[in-house]
Image (cartoon, grey):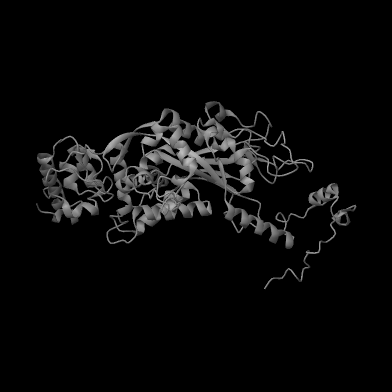
Amino acid sequence: MDKSWIKADKDSLQYEIGIENFLIFAEENAKNPKKISCPCARCVNFKKFTIKIIRGHLYESGVASSTKSSVGSTCPAKKPTPSLETYNVCQATYNDDEDWDNESDDFKRYVADVEQPLFEGSECTKLESVLKLHNWKARFGVSDKAFTDLLESVGSFLPKEHVLPGSMYEAKKTLTDLGLEYVKIHAFLNDCVLYMGPAAESLFECTKCHLSRWKIGKDGKVRVNVPAKVMWYFSIIPRFKRLFKSAATAKLMSWHAENRSKDGKMRHPSDYPAWRNVDGRWPEFRSKARNIRLGLAADGINPHNNGLNNRYSCWPVMLVMYNLPPWLCMKRKFMMLSILISGPYDNIDIYLQRMIDDLKKLWEEEEPNVYDAYSKSVFTLKAVLMWTVNDYPRYENLSGCINKGYKACPFWEGGKAKKVDYAWKKISIFFKLEYWKFHHVRHCLDVMHIEKNVCDNIIGTLLNMKYKTKDSVASRLDMIDMGVRTDLAPELGEKRTYLPPFPFTLSKKEKKLC
């Protein structure tokens, strides 16, 4: 079949005749003439339409560059094997796809955007271009209207056949279709509760503390529609299901049961007693190696600088999958960002509520009809949260156990070894999970992170850095109460409080480091 029409101008007679000949050929050879894969640059063979709709797409968008070499060729009637590469037009047109569920077809079409060049001969893909421009928009706070204008301007400089989205709506839809969607939820400033549900839409202040939902500017005016606090939730269930769309990843999800060494040495979390505890209590869960075992990590970061002189922070909550081999489970591509919290917080439980609801669903109700591309079968997915990984300050937030002050140690009070009655300030939200109370180890301390924090605190105290030093009026008064170094008691003046220097206190000259 002649393919020269593909490169012809879309307004030319040659292009029109070529399309008609191709559509006749496709209709005659297709198994279902009402569902033929569209080879246009937008659908890239992963959407099926009637001849009439495909004709309109080809006139509007042209033929996808990844399918030009195979248009019009004949193909044997065999089922395609799972692959991230785009199928050529004849394979997608003339073969049924019983091995794929509907979500797989949609996902494969969007993955094709990764391989689709921005224009013919470009080294940059469509998705890469959209991500770079979207990151630039977020970094400099560009409005949606200005971003749409930028996309239109950039598109006018590119060749006619480019696939760069022409508006903010199209760019956002591209990212959403690839599974990068999220839910943005407003929160009360004092972490009382989240603005969720129909009733919360009409609330403009907290019913408990009566603080405004909106941010208050330096001039004291309320900035309506600018939330005082916000969190972003990235739904975990669709992302777990998407892991199994790739045959390679689906195979790795059973590695802990099929491929690991079982010589009694600890090389992987599956060698730990905590893992065997889950296996022993819930044999049905153990019998399905594809069921996911998770670890949760949370800590604060300062995205603006090195964090030594800025009190702002945001808090990512990450999930790690332990089904994978040890050299992969901590790789960036398999670490899943589930929650992002803006600013410091007092109660993390309200922000974890959405994720806990999904984890309860994955354990109690399970997730049916998950397609496994490796075994080409559908199964019911379950997941269990094994433990959290955090530094010592975050241990208090996640577990509810007091780790500072006079009752920091649950077995020490007043110089005598005895159990403290009030060492817990709350019941952790993790106990809403049915299995949490049976875990041997619920919270793991990250020793390397703790060492880093101790080092930061020592340096902050030696250099007397604001917000970082541990030498304060409160700490000096605690020393007086304990009868330790009373000569270093703070001297209260009319305008300021003087703290006598410690032996380790550095002068301004000594603080000048080489």
The answer to whether residue 136 is seen in the rendering is yes
Q: Is residue 188 left or right of residue 19?
A: right
- Picture coordinates of residue 401 (x, y %)? 65, 39
The answer to whether residue 463 is seen in the rendering is no
| Vertical comparison of 493 with 506: above or below | above
- Picture coordinates of residue 265 (x, y %)? 45, 51
Task: Say which of 249 and 30 sits in front.
Answer: 249
Q: In which quadrant of the rendered view does residue 382 lie?
A: top left
Residue found 84% across the figure and 57% down from its top: 499
Residue found 20% across the figure and 51% down from its top: 11
Residue found 44% across the figure and 35% down from its top: 280
Q: Is residue 155 left or right of residue 483?
A: left
Task: Say which of 138 and 241 sits in front.
Answer: 241
Q: Is residue 237 left or right of residue 10?
A: right
- Picture coordinates of residue 191 (x, y %)? 63, 36
Q: In which quadrant of the rendered view does residue 180 lie?
A: top left
- Picture coordinates of residue 259 (x, y %)? 34, 48
In which quadrant of the rendered image does the C terminus lie?
bottom right
Residue that extends furthest to the front in the rendered view of this protein: 263
Task: Say which of 111 and 145 sits in front.
Answer: 111
Residue found 73% across the figure and 59% down from its top: 461
